[in-house]
Image: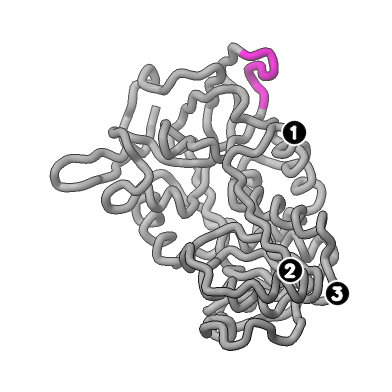
Amino acid sequence: MRALVVEKDDDGTRASVQDVDEARLPEGTVTVAVSHSTVNYKDGLCLGPGGGLVRTYPHVPGIDFAGVVEASEDDRYVPGDAVVLTGWRVGETRWGGYAEKARVDADMLVPLPDGMTARQAMAVGTAGLTAMLAIQAIEDRGIREGPVLVTGAAGGVGSVAVALLAAMGHPVAAVTGRPEQEGYLRDLGASQMVARADLADTVKRPLEAETWGGCVDAVGGAMLARVLGQMRYGASVAAVGLAGGAALPATVIPFLLRGVALLGIDSVMQPFDARVRAWRRIADVLPMDRLEAMIVPATLDDLPRLGADILQGQVRGRVVVEVA
């Protein structure tokens, strides 16, 4: 099988496409013929200098993949079933989706939703699943009057969150630091643009004008602290990323005086039923034309460059890797 393999020696790490004996695949109950994968921030770390999250070499990254079951020891799947995998430390602590074959435990998979192709599923990927989980979290608590803010809107989680929220009928305010992204974000459904610089200042007042009815935050750090003081009474923020840092230079005042909720979203090991429900809702709600507009096509040979690009914030939308 062809695979993108990351190796490490005294001179550092290097990634190259190689022919690999599939007998080297890890143990598992289901073998999948992988057709598509994608590129996430964690993949960039695995491909970056030092290997980031990787502990054992040689290694095949790729935290998401979609394909068709080739062999199964589990009654839930039979050869020919279309499946998707996101998270579960695949591509980090065990070989992942940047190969023509993958072997995993059945619990890690979900059926590919009806009406969605493998290519589209990878345009959704962990980022899109996370976006849906975040939206469901702020919906469950109640979205208040006013636009829903999406920070890091041109990135993987942000792009899908904008498209999903717009498809659900919510007005969306998209935050980006690049004016040239406005057309892309408006095509996804954003009704309002917010310059990143307008939210980048250190918090000066713990409470500002009540502006946002909810927020999907894919940045964290100082921007998240600033946004908390702008939420409407009883609104919630679903935080899904730490690109702006793990520190939160905020006070408790938004939580005490406005009842703002800060909801942490981690999609890595969601229960099977929750993952199936979220995937089905994405397939039902997300307009496929908007999803296709997010796709940046790539091959295995493109991945070393794209891994560096995503770490530098230079990737717009969702990179879909055609593995086979």
Q: Residues within 10 Å of mark 3 (few under 14, many from 20)?
A: some
- In this picture, is 111 found above or below 120? above
Q: How much space separates mark 3 and mark 2, taking CA atoms?
A: 14 Å
Q: Earlier in the sequence, mark 3 or mark 2?
A: 3
Amino acid type, mark 2: Val
- In this picture, is 227 found above or below 14? below
CB of mark 3 within 8 Å of CB of mark 2?
no
Q: Is residue 235 magenta?
A: no
Which element type, helix, strand or loop, lies under badge 3? Answer: loop
Q: Which sits in the foreground, 308 or 107?
A: 107
Q: Which sits in the foreground, 21 or 205?
A: 205
Amino acid type, mark 1: Asp
Q: Which sits in the foreground, 244 or 110?
A: 244
Which element type, helix, strand or loop, lies under badge 1? Answer: helix
* Residue where numbered disc 1 is placed: 273
Q: Which residue does the image show at 84% across and 70% down from the upper left?
A: 144
Q: Which sits in the foreground, 65 or 243?
A: 243
Residue 142 location in percent, x, y? 84, 62
* Residue where numbered disc 2 is placed: 260
Which element type, helix, strand or loop, lies under badge 2? Answer: loop
Does residue 303 appear anywhere in the picture?
yes
* Residue where numbered disc 3 is placed: 145
Amino acid type, mark 3: Glu
Q: How much space separates mark 1 and mark 2, taking CA atoms?
A: 28 Å
Residue 230 location in percent, x, y? 70, 80
- Of badges 3 and 2, nearer the viewer stands 2
Q: Quadrant of the N terminus?
A: top left
Q: Start and end of the magenta stretch?
A: 74-81
Residue 131 location in percent, x, y? 67, 55
